[in-house]
Amino acid sequence: MSAGDWALLILAVFWAVLVLVIAAVSVKLFQVLDSTREMIDGVRKETLPMLGEVRTTVTTVNQNLEHADTIIVSAGKITHNVERISTLVDQFVSLPLIKGISWAYGLQKGAKRFRGGA
């Protein structure tokens, strides 16, 4: 065998080893990509039902917030009505009652003086 034949033989062995290494790397890469695809499919299978539950929860919370808004508006109206009633009670009951008590006290003092008391 000549030197050229040896060089071709070494080159052929090198290329064969290189092809085997590339084939092994390709197989490992395919396994990694396949496991990644399986993981993504698993995540998708678990995520979609969870998103449905989240949508249902958000809808329920929005409905409850609408009810809470209605309750708050009603409470505000009740508070306003109580304020108005309190003002009316003050005007029509408290003030005349205070005046009546003051007038009665004045009559009592006047009666005591009339009878000769202090």
Image (tube, rainbow, N blue to C red):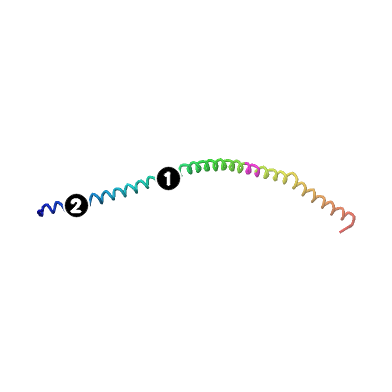
Which residue range is magenta in the image?
74-79
Instruction: Name the dominant secondary structure of the magenta segment.
Output: helix
Q: Nearer the viewer, residue 25 or 115?
A: 25
- What's the amino acid at mark 2? Val
Residue 111 horizontal/vertical position (percent):
87, 53
**Is 67 on the left or on the right of 16, as rendered?**
right
Q: Which residue position holds label 1?
A: 42
Q: Earlier in the sequence, mark 1 or mark 2?
A: 2
The type of residue carrying mark 1 is Gly
Q: Residue at x 30, y 48 (%)?
A: 27
Q: Residue at x 48, y 42 (%)?
A: 49
117, above or below 86, in the image: below
Depth check: give the residue in front, 56 or 75. 56
Q: Secondary structure at mark 2?
A: helix
Q: Which residue is mark 2?
A: 13
Q: Is residue 71 left or right of residue 57?
A: right
Q: Position of residue 112 (x, y in %)?
A: 87, 55
13 drawn magenta: no
State the CA–CA distance, disc 1 to disc 2: 43 Å
Which quadrant holds residue 45?
Answer: top left
The structure residue drawn at horizontal position 51% and vertical position 42%, both measured from the top left corner, is 53
**Does the residue at mark 1 contact the one at mark 2 (Cβ under 8 Å)?**
no
